[in-house]
Amino acid sequence: MTPPTAQLESRITPQLDELVAVRRDLHAHPQTCYEETYASELIQRELTALDIPFVAPLAETGVVAWITPTDPDAAAKPAAALRADIDALPITEQNDIPHKSVYPGFMHACGHDGHTTSLLGAARVLNQLRDTLPQPVKLIFQPAEEGGAGADRLINAGALTDAVGPHAADRIFGLHNWPNLPIGQVATRPGPLLAATDTPHITLTGPGGHAAFPHTTADPIVAASQIVTALQSVISRRVSPTAPAVLSITTFHGGEADNVIPDRVTLTGTLRTVDRLTRNDIITHAQNTAEQIATAAGCRCDFKIEPGYPVTENDPALTTHVTQLAAGLLGAENVITLPDPVMGGEDFAYYGSHVPATFLFVGSESPGNTPAHALHTPHFDFNDRILPTCIQLMCRFALSPYDPT
Ligand SMILES: [Zn+2]
Ligand SMILES: [Zn+2]
């Protein structure tokens, strides 16, 4: 019997013109953080046209759909889940393209319009292949990846369980377009792939005063400057050189007048780590460093960590499974195993604490793509040329039996 994956190209190609139009429609209508009503309604219309059952809205604008195999034995198995994020960013688009954002101040600068379209493309194809599905498929269209932890809210709403639809999922696959990698290649790694993100908030208070009489003040500006510099040594001197970690102070606010030493300075930044022990170590040392410098300067220090996304941890067996599927599509030489984690963050991380999960970068670099077209920049646009690869990868994940034992 011909494996169902052999039929994929001939089923995807005829859909591409329509799917590119869908992608560009989504690109033109970007919304952020639980306000993605345009995308949510478009997804629901597409699913309704395909006669695919779904629940919506979940977690404000999320949509969870499912495709049940015709074979009752396959239908009784746990589902394989596919995830796409649907949200955009608060960036003003500077592209001069017909599908430029019509919502001022917002744009799809991370390519989630392409991820959503890929999952809609996979839905079209998998719905045609219900008689060859080895298990049900759950299609998760998730809001608020960019800072809103939409994955967490969708999971809490039951997206992975049979509280939403008849099938509980026992594994999940997600992908991200990756402009730093050539088209035709994919990259991932088992274990930690993307970092945990935390936000430090440091507030220094102490007597301010006349700038000409600094000895009568505690000068939080000088103390905060010393803290910024000293925090760099926490990474270089308190963490193993082989443990990936980043601590960047990115905002520094204090003072209003040239001749006044302020009585308050606030610092914020980002902490990126890939294991819990290193994370806790850095937080302890950073807090001690900030507090002791503040004390020496006569200031009070309020040190808080606002937790962000956990580490995106790739299940090793499931990652091997997906890299084999990708190698079957692209050739083993085009499946890159990254030597190190990437220090960006992803809320796909939340899925991995409930079911085995794996996340993959899909190369989207093409001639003319320069660093100015990087993710989260005003000149970014999802590269439609990778839609067939993204759809193939999602379909192969859903169509290939998986048994980790
Ligand atoms: Zn992003
Ligand atoms: Zn993204």
Image (cartoon, grey):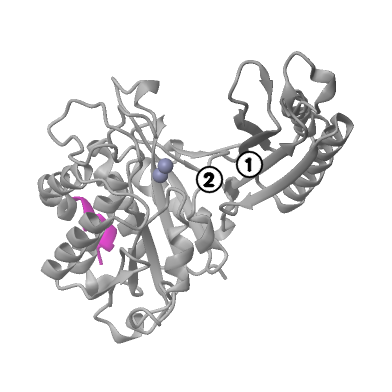
The answer to whether the residue bearing label 2 lies less than 8 angstroms from the nearest atom of ligand 1 is no
Left of 261 or right of it: where is 4? left
Residue at the disc numbered 2: 345
Q: Which residue corresponds to the image point at 69% horizontal and 40% vertical from the top-left?
A: 202
Mark 1 near ligand 1 (CB under 8 Å)? no
Does residue 347 appear in this view?
A: yes
Residue depicted at 34% across the width and 46% down the height: 329
Is label 1 in contact with label 2 (beta carbons under 8 Å)?
yes
Residue 238 x %, y %: 83, 36
Quarter location, residue 219: top right
Residue 119 at x, y percent in the picture: 28, 56
Image height of 113 relative to 131, above or below? above
Whether residue 376 appears in magenta in the rendering, the answer is no
Q: What x and y, as percent, mark residue 154?
A: 42, 67
Residue type marked 2: Gly
Q: Which residues are magenta?
A: 1-9
Q: Main secondary structure of the magenta part?
A: helix
Check disc 1 and report its element: helix, strand or loop.
strand
Image quarter for residue 194?
A: top right
Q: Disc count in the image?
A: 2
Q: Which of these two is toward me, 347 or 288?
A: 288
The residue that label 1 is drawn on is: 272
Left or right position of 141 against 260: left
One can see residue 400 in this view = no
Indicate whether 310 appears above or below 25.
below
Query: Percent position (x, y) of residue 169?
Result: 43, 73
